[in-house]
């Protein structure tokens, strides 16, 4: 089985030792993704939008798309902030909603309001 790894240059990839996405066994596994860049939005909706853009890019580079996502996990330090993200998530997955789980938990840095991890079928 061939394995392909894709880095996005995220702040923690080298520090922690992971890749943004790994293609293996016919799937694309995208690591938990928070808002990226030098100007992190303070609000959960802005952070959700940023994380989804990074995920979309990783999937595209790996040969997949948001329409191919079969599993998603949302992690938030405050579950009350999840509902404002729902319209963005419904738009991102459209007519192809994946199986989903939301977990309330601490994230790596308190500035992060949401982290999203997906698994997609490789096309």
Image: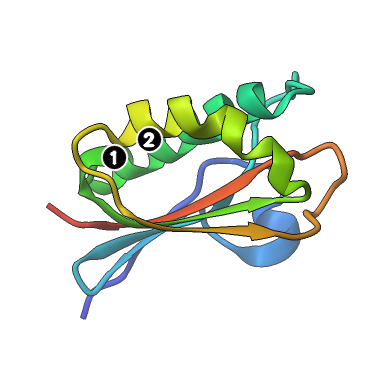
* Residue 66 located left or right of residue 79: left
Q: CA distance from mark 1 to mark 2?
A: 6 Å
Q: Kindly give the residue lying farthest to the left in the view shown.
A: 123
Q: Quadrant of residue 118?
A: bottom left
Picture residue at 65% right of the left edge, 65% below the top: 17
Where residue 76 appears, as percent x and y from the top left, is 69, 49
Per the image, the residue denoted by label 1 is 66
Choose between 53 and 18: the one closer to the eye: 53
Q: Say which element carries label 1.
A: helix
On the image, the x and y values in percent for residue 111 come to 84, 37
Q: In the figure, is residue 113 to the left or right of 31?
A: right
Q: Residue at x 64, y 32 (%)?
A: 36
Q: Residue at x 59, y 41 (%)?
A: 9
Q: Quadrant of the N terminus?
A: bottom left
In the drawing, what numbered circle is on residue 8?
none
Pointers 1 and 2 in contact (C-beta within 8 Å): yes
The dot on residue 56 is 2
């Amino acid at each position: 089985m061939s394995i392909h790894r894709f880095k996005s240059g995220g702040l923690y990839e080298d520090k922690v030792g992971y890749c943004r996405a790994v293609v293996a066994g016919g799937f694309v596994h995208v690591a938990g993704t928070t808002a990226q860049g030098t100007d992190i939005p303070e609000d959960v909706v802005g952070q959700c939008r940023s994380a989804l853009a990074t995920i979309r890019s990783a999937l595209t580079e790996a040969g997949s798309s948001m329409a191919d996502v079969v599993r998603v996990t949302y992690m938030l330090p405050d579950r009350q902030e999840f509902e404002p993200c729902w319209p963005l998530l419904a738009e991102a997955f459209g007519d192809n909603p994946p199986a989903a789980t939301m977990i309330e938990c601490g994230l790596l840095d308190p500035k992060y309001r949401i982290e999203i991890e997906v698994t997609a079928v490789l096309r």
